[in-house]
Image (tube, rainbow, N blue to C red):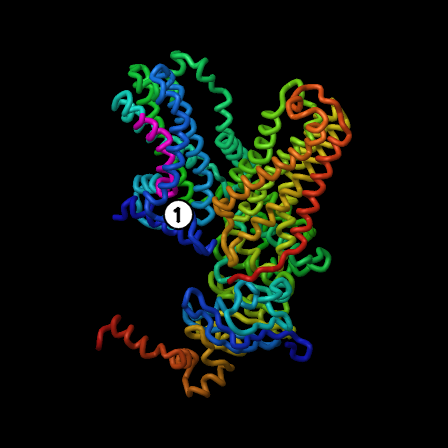
Amino acid sequence: MTGWKTISSILAKESNYRLKKKHGRKLTRFSTTNVVKSNFLGIVVMSGVSVVIIFPVLVDVQTHQAIPFFVGILGLLELFIGAFAMAYNLHVLLEDRLLEPLRFLPIEEDVVRKALLGIVVYWGGLSYTFILLTPSLLLALKFGMQFLAWGFFASITILLLSTGIGYFAGSLYTKYSKSIAARLASLVMWILIFGFGLIFRFIPKEGNFETTTFFLLIPPFSFGYAMLGYPTAYASSMLTFIASLLIYKYSSGRFWKVLSYGLVDSKAIYRRDWHVGFSRSYFIKKDLKLFSRNPKLLASTLYFLIVGPFVVLLSLLRAENLFSPLLPALSLFAAGVSGPSVAYAYAIEGSGAKLLYFLPLPRKILVREKATLILLFTLPIAILISFAVIVANPIIGVVTGATYFFTSYGSLLINSRLIASKLPKEPASWTEKLPSQSFALAIFFGEFILFGFLAGLALTPYVIKLGLRNLMAGNLPLLPEALAVPLIISIGVLILGLLITSFLEEKVGG
Amino acid sequence: MDVLGKLMLRYVNVTKQFGGIVAVNDVSIHFEPGKIYALLGPNGSGKSTLMKLALGVIKPDFGKIFVGSVDPSTDPISARKIVGYSPEDVILYESLTPAEHISFVGSIYGLNKKELDKRVKMLIKLFKMNEHMNKLVGELSRGNKKKLSLILALLHDPKILILDEPFSGLDPEIGRVLKELMKKHAKESKVVLFSTHILELAEAVADEIAIMHRGKIIEVGSKMELRDKLQAKNLEDVFMEVTGLSTELKDLLTILWGAE
C-alpha cells in the first residue's frame, strides 16, 4: 500500500519538476524534495525574526510575566504566515492538478490527509513551526524544559490549524460553479484569511497586557500561560490542540472529497440560449470573468490593492493632517508600491495560459491589457480618495486622485513588463509562483525604495520652505509647487510605463 | 512560398532537440494547399513538435520554416494568424464557458461579429455544442472539450489547418463531420495537416501520408504510392516496414504468446 510519505514526496517532486520546466532553472524552496533543504532558509529566517521579538524576555528576567504576550504574538504570526502560505500552495495544487492522478487510485482518505500535511511540510511549512520552537528552546535553557514542551505543542497545534483553515478555504474554491452565493462565501473566507494580519492592531500593548481569565483561555496566548504553569491554560491549550486536529481532519477530508468528486456543480441548470460577442475589449472581459470565478485570487488582489495602500496612507497621517497638502506625495508612494499586484492578473490565467501561446496575441498587448485590468480595480480607489479629499479641499483632492491614477497605471505597466519578461517561454500554466519569489521580493523592495525616493522628491518644496521637522505638523500652507511636483512625477512614471511597453519583441520559446 | 497564390507550409532542414533528445531531425517537407496530409507515427516520434514549430511556440535549433512567406521563429504573431491549431491535449480555461471562449479567441483574431455570426452558428451546430454553450468548460466531458478546441481552431477560417490527434475522444458521428470539414477546407485550396498514430484514420482521411519515426520523415506519398513502393498489402505493412518496427513487434508478440 502506498504510504503518505511516498505520496507527499511524489507530489513535491512533481511540483518541483513542473516549476523547473516552467522557469528553466532551479527554484527556491520548491526546487528540492529534501525536507531539511527545502525548509532550511525558512528555519533560519523564522528563528531570526522570532528571537528578535522575544529578545526583551531573554535578557531581562523581570519581564518573565510578559512571556504569554510574546508567545501569543509569535503564535499569531505562525498562524498568519501558515494560512497565507496555504493560499499559494493551494493554487499550485489546483492549477497544476497535482492531486488528479490520485483520484482514481485505491488510497484511503486517512493516507491522503497525512500526505496533504506532508506536502505542506515539503513546501516550507516546517519552517513556520520554528517561529515558536526556537524561542521556546531559548526560554527552556533559561527557565526550564516545560517551556520547550509547550512551545513544541503550540507550534504543532498552529501548523495543524493554519493548514486546516487553508484546506477548508480550498474546499470552497467552487472552481466550476457559476453559483454566485458559493463564490461569495469563498470570497469572504479568503478575505478573512488575508485580513487576518490586521488582528495584530487589536492586541493590547505589552504594558497593558494583564493576566485576565480572557487571555488565559484564548489561544495562542494560553500556551504562554501554560508555560508559566496556569492549570486553566493547560486545559485551554489541550482543547485548542484537539480542535485544531479536528479542523485539519475535517478540512483536508472535505478538500479531498471535493476534488475526488470533481469540481462540478451537478445541480446547476443552464440557459439554452447563448450569446457570442466579438468586441476588441473581450480580453479584459475574459479576465474579469476569471476573477469573478476565482474568489481566492480576487481576495488576494483586493487585499493587495486596497488594504496595502490604505494602511500606508493611514499610518502616515494623523487626524489633524488627514487632508494635508502632503497627500499627493503620499498617494504617489502608495500607488507606486501597489504596482506588483499586476502579478495577479497573470496568475488568474492559470492553466488556460497555455492557450495564449498558440494565439496571435502580441506581448505588447498582453502587457498593457494586464496592467489595464488591475487599473480597473485601482480606479475606484483613486475616485474614492479624490472625493474624500475634495470635500475638504477641492484642489488637493483632484491632484491626489490624479497622482494616484497616473502613478498606479505607470507602475502597473512597468511591473507588467517586468513580469512578462519572466514568463515561461514554452506553454505552461501561470500561477502565483510566477515570477519566482526572489524576483518578486527584489521588485517589491526595489520599488519600495524607488517610490519612497520619488515621494520624498515630491515633498522637496515643503522641505526647502519649512524644513524637515515641521513637515508632519498639521495646518501646512498650500504651496502650488508642492502640488505640481507629485503630479509631474506621476505623469513621468506613466510615460515611462508606456514607453517601456512600446518596444517589446516577440519571444519564441527555446 | 506560395503555389499559384495559395499558401504553403514548408520545413527546410529543421532540427529541434530537447535536452539532448532529438525530437525533429533534419526534416525537409512541404505541405501543399488543396490536400489533406496525415502525419503518421508512433508515440514520441516528433509529430507534435513538428506542428508546434509552425506556430512559433518553439524555435528550431537548425533550419527554416515557412508559413506562406512568414518565418514563425521571427514573426510568430503573423504565423498564428494564418494557422488554425488544435493541440492533442485540449488547452482551455476551465472556468469560462464555450461561448466566452469563442468571444475571447474571436477578439484575439480581430474577428467581426457580423461576418462571423453565421460561421460560429454553423460550427456549433456541426459539432452539436448548442446545449453546452453556457456551461463552464470544467463541467464538460473530454469529447465536448475536444469539440470546443476544434471550433476555436476553425474559428478564423484559417488558410493552414493543423490538428494534433483531432479524432481522439470524438464520437463516430462528430468524427465523420470533422473528416468532411477537413475535405471542405482542402477543396477550398487550404492546407490541412493532421497527426495520428492510427493507421486506419490516416488511410481513410488523408490524400498524402508522411510517416515520421524518431524525429525523421521516412516516407511521404499517397496511399497507393507507398503501397506500390514497398509492395505491401496495406498501410500497416508499409508502416511496419519503413519504421523497422516489424522485427520489434515479432519480439513483443513472442513475449505475449510464447514461441509457439
Q: Residues within 10 Å of mark 1 (few under 14, many from 20)?
A: some
Across and down, in percent, residue B260 comes to 22, 77
Q: Is residue A176 above or below residue A474?
A: below
User: What secondary structure is marked by label 1?
Assistant: loop
Residue placed most toward the observer, B201 or B9: B9
Residue placed most toward the observer, B21 or B170: B21
How many numbered marks are there? 1
Where's the N terminus of chain B, which quadrant? bottom right
Magenta span contains residue B152? no
Identify the chain of the residue marked 1, using the numbered disc in the image: A
Residue bearing mark 1: A99
Residue type marked 1: Leu
The answer to whether A106 appears left or right of A301 in the picture is left
Q: Is residue A170 above or below residue A468?
A: below
Across and down, in percent, residue A1 comes to 25, 48
- Span highlighted in magenta in the image: A119-138
Which secondary structure type mostly characterizes the magenta part of the structure?
Answer: helix
**Residue that appears at 53% across and 55% down:** A354
Q: Is residue A138 above or below residue B140?
A: above
**Residue that appears at 70% across and 35% down:** A486
Residue placed most toward the observer, B227 or B88: B88
